[in-house]
Structure formats: C-alpha cells, structure tokens
Amino acid sequence: AQTAQLGELRAHLGTVGPDAVAPYLGHYEHPTLGDVEVALRDGKLVFDAGEIRSEMRPQIDEAGQVVSYVFTDPPLAGPTPVTFRQDDDGRPEVVAVVEDEGGATTYVFTFMEPGLTATPTP
C-alpha cells in the first residue's frame, strides 16, 4: 500500500524552482532533532540531517501551484509535507508535519544566521 501511495504522490510532484527556494537555503536547528541543512545541489533540493539525507520535491495542486515539498528518498520518503515560511521577524523556517498512529506532530526548524552557532535552550 505504501508503494502505491508513493507512486501516486510522485505523480503530483513538480520540479524545484531555484528562485522560489533560494531564500530558504541554509542551516536550521531544532531543539530535539538537531541541525539540518537545506541546500540546492545539482538542481535538487536536499534536506541534509547528517546520517539522514533526502531530496525534496514540490507537491503541486491541480492548478500547478506548489502546496508543499515532500521527501523522495528513504527512510524519509512518503507523505510528510514540508513547507517553507517566515516567522514574525522574517526569518526562514522549515516546517515538517509527521503523521503516525497517534496523530500529527509538527516540527519547526529555525534558520541559523551564518556565522552563529546554535544556542542551547535552558
């Protein structure tokens, strides 16, 4: 069932628009999941968390608009929508919504300014 679901998901994937993702490229941090990098490598949008790395492709709606991005490589591949947004201060954020039997969990990764190290949370 998961293979069929993934096949259907891939049918609704578009290609990455470099200009659309440019403001969101860089390093992010999450208090429990650690640091990740969002990069554009050889035209592919890559979510790199060290041991786990996955290409992200835009999921498009009927009108051809990007709804979210999805991971296309195991172990992350599947219906985990990832969106890019800006917080109230205009800083980029990466938001991933992971669904499991207990419901959905939203993970927000905060952009780290170049040259700054992650600050430990008290």
Image (tube, rainbow, N blue to C red):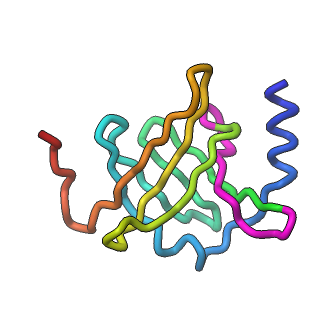
Left or right? Give the position of 17 relative to 107.
right
Q: Dividing the picture into quarters, in which one does residue 31 lie?
A: top left
Q: Residue at x 27, y 67 (%)?
A: 113
Q: Residue 104: where, in percent of width, then height?
A: 56, 33
Q: Residue at x 36, y 58 (%)?
A: 27
Frontmost residue, 74 versus 85: 85
Left or right? Give the position of 96 relative to 108.
right
Quarter holding the C terminus is: top left
Frontmost residue, 83 versus 37: 83
Left or right? Give the position of 12 relative to 83.
right
Outermost residue on the top side: it is 101
46 above or below 64?
above
Q: Dividing the picture into quarters, in which one does residue 63 lie?
A: bottom right
In this rendering, the count of numbered labels is 0
Residue stretch rendered in magenta on the structure = 62-76
Quarter holding the N terminus is: top right
Q: Residue 109: where, in percent of width, then height?
A: 39, 51
Q: Is residue 45 on the magenta stretch?
A: no
Outermost residue on the bottom side: it is 19
Q: Residue at x 34, y 44 (%)?
A: 30
Q: Residue at x 62, y 20 (%)?
A: 101
Q: Is residue 69 on the magenta stretch?
A: yes
Q: Main secondary structure of the magenta part?
A: loop
Q: Residue 12: where, in percent of width, then height?
A: 83, 54
Q: Residue 115: where, in percent of width, then height?
A: 21, 66
Left or right? Give the position of 66 relative to 20.
right
Q: Dividing the picture into quarters, in which one does residue 79 lie?
A: top right
16 above or below 7?
below
Outermost residue on the left side: it is 122
